Amino acid sequence: MSIRSHILGYPRVGAKRELKFAKESYRKGEISKTEFLAKAQAVEVSNWLVQMNAGLSFVTV
């Protein structure tokens, strides 16, 4: 029997609040919708990789 591990939640804004700053830039018109969505996807993938590299059995999405 193996032990499985997971966490109940993970901050979605990024390690250095990248998503928050991207959202603010988008609302100010400093970046396009495409750039904002690309940043959001990059933060999401980064969050998944951190969880997978930590050895969790289930990744919080």
Image: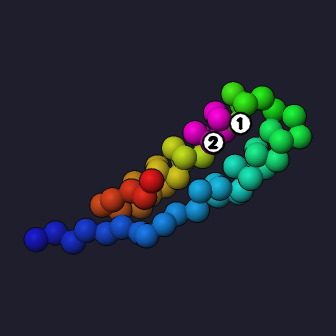
Q: Where is residue 24 in the image (x, y as percent from the top left)?
A: 82, 47
Of the pair 39 and 33, the residue shown nearer to us: 33
Location of the N terminus (image quadrant): bottom left
Instruction: Tell me the element at label 2.
Output: helix
Is the Cβ of the residue at disc 2 closer than 8 Å to that at disc 1?
yes
- 26 left or right, relative to 28: left
For disc 2, the marked residue is: 40
Part of the protein shown in magenta: 37-42
Q: Which residue is drawn at 80% across and 39% down?
A: 26
Q: Which residue lies at the image location 81% right of the left edge and 32% below the top edge?
A: 31
Circle 1 — which element?
Answer: helix
The percent position of residue 38, horizontal first and vertical second, equals: 64, 33
Amino acid residing under circle 2: Ala
Indicate whether residue 50 is drawn in magenta.
Answer: no
Q: Which residue does the image show at 63% across and 42% down from the upper left?
A: 40
Residue 48 image point, x, y percent: 46, 50
Residue 42 lies in what quarter of the image? top right
**Looking at this rendering, what residue extends furthest in the front direction?**
27
Q: Name the residue under label 1.
A: 36
Q: Does the image show residue 33? A: yes
Question: Where, by quadrant of the figure, is residue 52 drawn?
Answer: bottom left
Q: Where is residue 32 in the image (x, y as percent from the top left)?
A: 78, 29
